[in-house]
Amino acid sequence: MGKQKIERSFKLVEERGQKAFVPYIMAGDGGLDALKERILFLQDCGATVIELGIPFSDPVADGPVIQEAGKRALANGTTLELVLNCLDMMKNEVIVPIILMTYINPIYAYGIKEFVEQCNKVGVDGLIIPDLPFEQRNIITSYTNDLGIALIQLVSITTTIERKRKIIEEAEGFLYAVTVTGITGARSSLHKNLTPFLQELKELSHIPVLAGFGISNKNQAQDVSENCDGVIVGSEVVRLLHENKRADLKELMSSLKNVEC
């Protein structure tokens, strides 16, 4: 399914006149036994896509909240192989597209070809690999292209216009617009150049543009989404799940949708 499944999910949001909401969760935070319940909860709350993080010992893009979630997951014995096994067992119940966010080291350790084939088997629709340079993307896309799995590209505020054009030309699934110059985590305010940055990406991109990093409340989500197709929220979702504040999480997720969950 892969790219087509992601495309259909965004098309449905657009037809409803809504904006996309993509929650990020850390696999194994709270134990792998909780993973299925959390994914189905977010699915029932209307997630457009779910970004599922794989815990890693050197997470260069992750802020404090997600780092701590990763430590808890690792302490629980979470591995990439176990996460893929869990996804395999729940794939018949999961309708929402699943995108794995992981770093290149665990993929190398697993075996690139074997990893991509297993992702396809268990119903993974896309991949986000923050430390994979755009120029080296073929080490992944040489396998994902044949299976229809999307490799999501990231573009930052500091990316040059020439590089933006190159990345967007090859982008698939959706374009991940990084809204801060730094790691993930809640911010009291967002970058002063965020609006023109998102507007430029919208003009250039042939696929949905989603803003992520630093969005932590419904007002920020609503404000940012005015200039793009939706938002990705990680640290706040992770925190609310960890603190079992489901009502607050439902409110945050419904801020971009005219539905109850």
Image: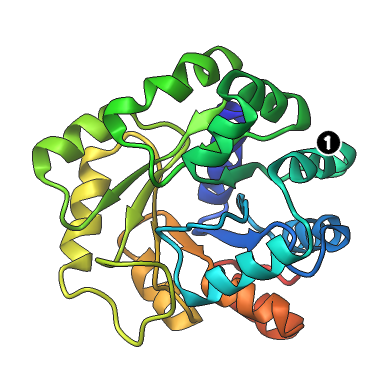
| Image vertical order of residue 159 relative to residue 251, above or below | above
Give the percent coordinates (x, y) of residue 86.
Answer: 83, 44
Instruction: State the residue at coordinates (79%, 44%).
Output: 82
Q: Secondary structure at mark 1?
A: helix
**Which amino acid, mark 1?**
Asp
Q: Quadrant of residue 161?
A: top left
Q: Colour scheme of this structure image?
A: rainbow
Taking depth in this image into account, of 132 and 224 the one nearest to the observer is 132
Whether residue 217 is visible, yes or no, is yes
Q: Residue at x 56, y 24 (%)?
A: 112
Q: Does the rendering let one see residue 128?
A: no
Percent x, y for residue 261?
Answer: 76, 70
**Where does label 1 land, which residue?**
88
Q: Residue at x 71, y 76 (%)?
A: 241
**Count of numbered badges drawn on the protein:** 1
**Is 117 rendered above or below residue 21?**
above
Identify which residue, 135 or 223, lies in the foreground.
135
Relative image position of residue 100 (x, y in whole percent): 60, 44
